[in-house]
Amino acid sequence: MKMIRNFFNHYSALIVLGLLLCGGLFRVMRGGARTRDWLILSGGLVGLVAVWWAVRPVARSSELSAGQPVLLEVQSPYCLGCVALKPAVDRLENEWRGKLQVQRVDIQSPAGKKLVNQYRIELTPTFIFLDGTGREQWRSVGGVDAAQVRLSLER
């Protein structure tokens, strides 16, 4: 059961895209498969892929700065929740540049698989706030609270 839940969580964007494609194909075939309908379906599919490509979260690996707090985001580029939270995480990263390092890790990468085991992560996105010594201070699953980040940094 856990494996099925994780699959749907990690690949939710692809699953939704597939369902939309199947629904569109069903509608086109039911309506007589006119050229105009195929063009609309194709354009919609290209548009959805373009939007996902523009807003998808991209994992970045870099060396962690010693003594600097880290907000670790464990995510999947195919997770709708991860895609939806990308602008909020980007704002946090820009607002606290120099005081907070945001580290995004893809669960499907070797480093991500290691973190999943190390921190016992089940769902994405998972945010883990590490203090300057690397100790976990708190974690949040499914979202990140900017006020909690601010409070942790002001301590």
Image (spheres, grey):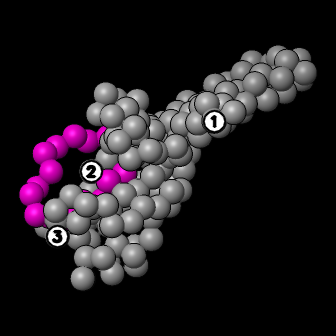
Q: Is residue 35 left or right of residue 10?
A: right
Mark 1 or mark 3: whose residue is earlier in sequence: 1
Mark 2 or mark 1: whose residue is earlier in sequence: 1
Q: Is residue 92 left or right of residue 37?
A: left
- Secondary structure, mark 1, is helix
Residue behind mark 2: 103
Mark 2–mark 3 contact, CB under 8 Å? no
Residue behind mark 3: 99
Instruction: Point out the stretch of residues depicted in magenta.
Output: 59-73
* Label 1, residues with CA under 10 Å away: few <14, some 14-19, many ≥20: few
Residue behind mark 1: 2
Q: Which is in the foreground here, disc 1 or disc 3?
A: 1
Identify the residue at horizontal 32%, vertical 53% (top origin).
72
Q: Quadrant of residue 37?
A: top right
Q: Position of residue 18 (x, y in %)?
A: 67, 27
Placement of 95 over or under 78, stated as above or below? below
Identify the residue at horizontal 23%, vertical 66% (top origin).
131
Q: Amino acid at mark 2?
A: Gln
Disc 1 from disc 3: Cα separation: 37 Å
Q: Amino acid at mark 3?
A: Lys
Check residue 113 in the rendering and tell me which mark sits there, or answer none: none
Q: Position of residue 91 (x, y in %)?
A: 34, 66
130 or 39: nearer the eye?
A: 130
Identify the residue at horizontal 11%, vertical 55% (top origin).
65
Q: Is residue 106 left or right of residue 66?
A: right
28 or 23: nearer the eye?
A: 23
Placement of 77 over or under 95, stated as above or below? above
- Judged from this view, the residue extending furthest toward the left is 66
Q: Amino acid at mark 1?
A: Lys
Placement of 104 over or under 37, stated as above or below? below
90 or 8: nearer the eye?
A: 8
